[in-house]
Image: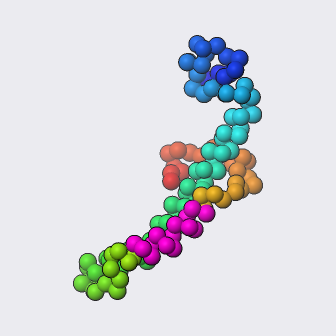
Amino acid sequence: GVAMGIMGSEVSKEAADMILLDDNFASIVVGVEEGRLIFDNLKKSIAYTLSSNIPEITPFLLFILLRMPLALTTILILCVDLGTDMIPAISLAYEEAESDIMQRRPRNAQVDKL
């Protein structure tokens, strides 16, 4: 349930799942919108990081499977990874919300995972 933070009783606050600190039901809509934005941006950041790391993992797999020599050491590849992947991944985390973020249906937790 939902309890009011300012006007609600202590009993209702203890029994509630969510407490509105400003006693405004519009805060729920703002919270849902912010949660959807965070989820979308997290999915974008994870997809970018995984897709950009595949070319970096490939030489290691070739080294292990085919005994092909490495062009760069492990430390150098990690330095290149930190230098080139961190800034774009962080910028995806601060991306603005899409225009239809509140028109979408709620996500299905069974199907839509990170």
Vertical relation: 5 (above or below) 68: above
Which picture quadrant has residue 74? bottom left
User: Along the horizontal axis of the image, is 79 left or right of 46?
Assistant: left
Q: Is residue 6 visible?
A: yes
Q: Is residue 51 visible?
A: no
Task: Give coordinates of residue 55: x percent, y percent.
Answer: 43, 77
User: Along the horizontal axis of the image, is 108 left or right of 73?
Assistant: right
Task: Give coordinates of residue 3: x percent, y percent.
Answer: 65, 21
Task: Identify which residue, 35 or 74, lies in the foreground.
Answer: 74
Q: State which quarter of the image contains the N terminus.
A: top right
Task: Identify which residue, 86 or 68, lies in the foreground.
Answer: 86
Q: Chief secondary structure of the magenta span?
A: helix
Task: Give coordinates of residue 31: x percent, y percent.
Answer: 66, 39
Q: Is residue 94 magenta?
A: no
Which picture quadrant has residue 25? top right
Magenta-drawn segment: 78-91
| Figure label count | 0
Give the image's coloring scheme. rainbow
Residue at image coords 71%, 17%:
7
Q: Is residue 90 magenta?
A: yes
Residue at image coords 71%, 28%:
22
Vertical relation: 107 (above or below) 84: above
Residue at image coords 39%, 76%:
77
Vertical relation: 51 (above or below) 20: below
Which picture quadrant has residue 96? bottom right
Residue at image coords 55%, 57%:
43
User: Along the horizontal axis of the image, is 66 left or right of 91?
Assistant: left
